Amino acid sequence: MHAGIAALLLAGVPTGALAQVARHTENLSAPVRTFGRVSYDARSLMIDGKRQVIWSSEFHPFRLPSPDLWRDILQKMKASGFNTVALYFDWGYHSPKQGVYDFTGIRDMDRLLDMAAEEGLYVITRAGPYVNAELSRGGFPGWLVNQRARARTDDPAYLAAVDEWLSQINAIIARHQINGDGEGNRGTVILHQIENELALTTPAQRRYMDHLYAKARADGITVPIFHNDQGRNGYWVPESSNVEHVVHGPNDLYAFDGYPGGTCTVTGKPTRGSAAPDWGFYGPGGAKGGASASPDTPGFLAEFGGGWFDYWGSNGSYDCNAIQRGKRFQRVFYGTNLANGIDIQSFYMGYGGTSWGWLPAPVVFTSYDYGAAISEPRNLREKAGEMKQLGELIAAVPDLAGMVPAGQPEISSPDIQVYHNRNPETDARFLMVTHKPSNARSDDRFTITADLPDGRYTLPMQLNGFDAKWLVAGVTLGGQRLVYSTSELQTALHRPDSDLLLFYGRSGEAGETVLRYKSAPQVAVLEGQVKSAFDAAHGDLKLDYTHDGRAVVRITGGGRPPATLILADEAEGQRYWRQDSDAGPVLVRGPVLVRHARISGATLSLTGDTAEPTPLELWAPAAVRKIRWDGDSVATHKTALGSLAATAPLPGPASVVLPTLSWRMAHGSPEARPDFDDSGWQAIDRRRSATITAKPDGQPTMVMDAYGFHEGDVWYRGRFTGSPDAQELALFYGAGGSGMVQVFLDGRFVGQDVLPSGLPRPITTGMARLTLPAAAQAPGEHVLSVMVRSNGHNWDLDADDFHKEARGLVSASLAKPGGRSFTVPIAWKIQGRRGGEDLVDPARGTPNNGGLYGERQGWHLPGFDDSGWQAATVPAERQRAGTNWYRSTFNLAVPKGQDATIGIAFGDTTSPRSPVRYRAILFVNGWNMGQFIADIGPQRVFPVPEGILNHHGRNTIALAVTSDGAPGDALEAVRLVTLRDVRGGVPVRQVAAPDWIAPPQ
C-alpha cells in the first residue's frame, strides 16, 4: 500500500493547467506509536484506533473569571464545529508566592476539564511553565522575577521552581486524560504541551526540555507530548526525524505555529494579505518547511492565527482582525493546511476574553478579544458560522483524516489551483479549490477534470473573489454514495431507514451534485427548483440547481435508502445546527445557537439561544413526537419536507433596562501629603535584585519586585534635606506599556511622565526629568511622593529573562542642572499591594490589586461604606492631581432566562481617544475589570461577565481615576451599555468573593 501511495505522491498529469505538486514529506512507512487510547503515525492522530482530524480552538479560562460561563464558551465551540479545545494554564494566576498554589473558585481547573468532557470536547493542555499568551511575564509568577537563576534553562533553582508548579498542574491534567490516571479518574485530554516557543536550543535548553518531559511522565501524564515551535524553525523535533538541520528534542510530536495572512491598516481596513502558505505536502520541505521537519509524525499546527492582539494607543483593530482572519480567510488558509496533511489544527483564539486586572503584558490592553470567532462579549461573529460549516464537514466525513496527495487533476484556468488528496483506505477524495495565488480576487469560471473513485469527471466550477471551496468526492455518506458535488457538503445525518444531506454554495452560483445508484431512483422536488437527470450507463443521478435560499429534494428507490437533500445558499446553510443525541442525530434550523439535543422517549429537548422571535424547524429520529425548547413545550406540525416545524416563532429576548449611574467621590492620594504615616512601609535598602536592568553604581535597590510587589501601582516616599542642589529630579523607571510616574513634593503636584504609546512593541522603561519647585531648596526636611503605574512585565519570548526588566523606580537622582547627579541624598520607603505576596483577597487573586491607597483601604469593595463621601457630578470638569475615587451603586433586573453581556462605557465610544488626559481603573463588585486611558486608548467599552456583575440585584462600580489635575483632565461620562442580549444562555451564579475586607489598623 505504501508503495502505491508514494507513486501517487509523484504522479503528474501532462495536459492542461496543473494542480498543486506534492512532495514526499511524510514517512508513510513510519510505525504507529501508541500512548494508551491515543496513537499516531505520519498521517494522523488516532483515538481508539480511529483516525481523527483534530479541529481545535484556544480558550484561556483565566481571561473569563466567571466559571459558569466557561460552559457557555465550550458549548459555543462545540456547536461551531470544533471537536477539541486547547487550554493554556497561567502559572502566575495560581501562585502568588513561592510554595503557595490555589486551584479553587475561578482557578478550579478540575472543574474546567470536567466541563470540557461533559460538552464532548477533546482537550489539548498547554501547561507552560512558560506560555507567553501576551500575559505579564508570559505566565511566570511574580515571585519568579526575583530568582537570579536564568529562566527556561536547566539551572537547578529554576527547575525546582518549575517542579513546584508542574507537580500541581500535572496531577490535575493526569486525572483528566483520556487514558485515565489509574485511580478511576478519566477525562478527554489527548495531547499535552511542555513548553512554548522555546527559541534557544543550547545544551542547557535541551537538558531543560528533557527535564520537563521526564517530569510530565513521572507525574502520570501518558498522552503524547509536544512543544510548539515558534515560526517553523525545526526546533524540538522528535528524535526519529532524519531531516537535516532540525534540533531534536525529547517530545513525541513536532508542532509549530504561524500567523500568516496580513494585518489590518492603522485606519482599521483589511488588507489583501499574503497567500496561504504550504507547510506540508505541497510546501518546500526541510527543517523550516513546517510539518516536513518531522516525517514520522502527523502535521500539527499548535497555533494558527484566528486573529491578532491589539496594543495601547492603536485605533482599535479587533473588529477588523475578525474580518482579516475571518470569513473566506478561514476557508483558504485552514483548507490549505488540511490539504497539506496538517490533520491537527488549533486556532488561536477561539475566544479571547478579557485580560482583567493586571494580567496583560505591556503589548496589550485589557481587551483580548483577538478578533476571535467568539467575541469578548461572547457573541458568535459571522466567521463562527463559516467555521461551523467547515467543522461539520470534517465531522461528517471521517475519511478526511489521514489523507495523502492523489495526483494532479486538470484545471482549465491558470488562475486556479486545486489540492487533490485521497484516503488510502477508502479512496475518498478532498479537492480544495482556490485561486492561484490564493489571495487573488478575480472572478473565474473553469472546469476541473479528475480521475475520481467512481470514474473520470469534469466539474464545472465558479470562484469569485477571495474564496476557496472544500469539495469531497467518492464518499459514502450513510446509505448514499456521493460521486461528486460542486456544492460544499455541510453535514450528513444517517438513520437506519434514511439519510439527510445538507449542501451549500455561494448565493446565485450554479450547483451540480452527482449520486450513484444501481437503478433509476425517483426524484421529488419538495421546495425550490432542481433539475435531475439519470445516466443509466454509469448509475449517476445528476442534480442541477442554483444556490438561492433553499431547495429540498427527496430521492427514493434506486437500490438505496431514501435520502433528503437540502441545497442551500451559504447564509441559509449557516442557519442549521447539527446536534448528536444518544438516540440519533438532529438537524435544527433557525435559532442563533443550538447548544444541546437530548431525546427521552418521544420528547426531544433542545437548548439554545434566540436573538429575536425565531421560526424553528428540525429533522429528528422518527420516534420524536414532542419538542421542548429551553424547557418550554413547543407546538409543532409535520411538514411536507419530513421536518417538524413550530407553529409559532420561538420568543426572543425582552429589552434590558439599564439605570443611569449616580456617583460619590473621595480624594485618594494621601501618600502625597508630607504628614502621611508611612511608618509601616518597607525601607528601600541595598538588597540583591534579579532584574536585568542595571542601576547606577552605589545606588540602593528601588525596583518594586524586590520588595514583593509585582502588580499595579506602587508608591515611594523619599525624605531629603533641602539645599540649593535640590532642583531637578531624574527618575529612571520601568512601567510597562503606557505606564506612568507621578511626582509630588510636600503634597504639591510636580508633574508626571508617561511612556510612549501607539507602538506594537512598546518602550517599557523611561527617564523622567522634573524641575522641583523652589521650596525644595528651603532648609529642613522635604518629602517626595512618587507613584509608578506598572502596566505589566515583559514576556520572555526570546528566553533572555526579558520578564525581569525593572518595574517601579530604578534610580532617583536629585541634583542641580549641569551638576553631579545624586548630589542630594534621599531616604526612600516603598508600598505596593497590601500584603504583597501574601494575598488578603485570595478569591480574586494575584491580578486584582495594586498598591493604591484606596485599594489598601478596601474602597474598591462593594461592602465599603461610602456614605461619608461627597456627591459627585460625572462628567467632572476638574479633579485634584493624583488619584480620586468614584463609586456608584445600582440594581440590575435582567429578565430571567436571558443571557446578556453588559459593559461600562467611558466618554465618546465612537472615538478611540479623548483630548483630555486621565486614566481609570475599573472595579466592579470588587473585581478589577481593566484600565481605561482616555488620551491613549483605544478601549472605551469594558464588557463585564455575569457572575462578576450581578444581573439580578445590587452592584457597585468603583473607579480609581488618576489625572494631572489640569483643566478638563477629569472623568468623562460613564454609562452602562448592553453589548449582547439573547434569550437562553447557561445558568450563572455570582462568583464567590468577599464584599469587605477590613483595612489594617
Image (cartoon, helix red, strand yellow):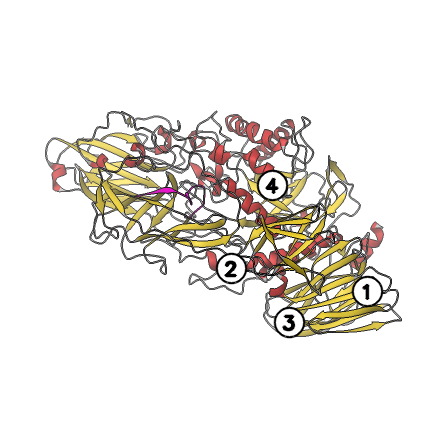
Q: Whole-Å distance between the Cαs marked 4 and 2?
A: 29 Å
Image quadrant for the C terminus? top left
Residue 373 or 998: which is nearer the viewer? 998
* Residue named by callout 3: 548
Q: Residues within 10 Å of mark 1 (few under 14, many from 20)?
A: some
Q: Amino acid at mark 1?
A: Thr
* Image coords of residue 661 (percent x, y): 31, 49
Q: In terms of secondary structure, where does tag 4 sit?
A: helix
* Residue named by callout 1: 556
Up-down: is 564 above or below 963? below
* Residue named by callout 2: 612
Where are the magenta residues, as a range?
944-959
Residue 87 picture quarter? top right
Q: Residues within 10 Å of mark 2 (few under 14, many from 20)?
A: some
Query: Going from the N terminus, do you reach mark 4 or mark 2 first?
Result: 4
Query: Going from the N terminus, do you reach mark 1 or mark 2 first?
Result: 1
Residue 513 picture quarter? bottom right
Question: Magenta segment: does it hold 946?
Answer: yes
* Residue named by callout 4: 116
* Image coords of residue 22 (percent x, y): 73, 58
Question: Magenta segment: does it hold 923?
Answer: no
Residue 28 or 359: which is nearer the viewer? 359
Identify the residue at horizontal 64%, vertical 71% (top origin).
548
Q: Amino acid at mark 2?
A: Glu
Q: Amino acid at mark 3?
A: Asp
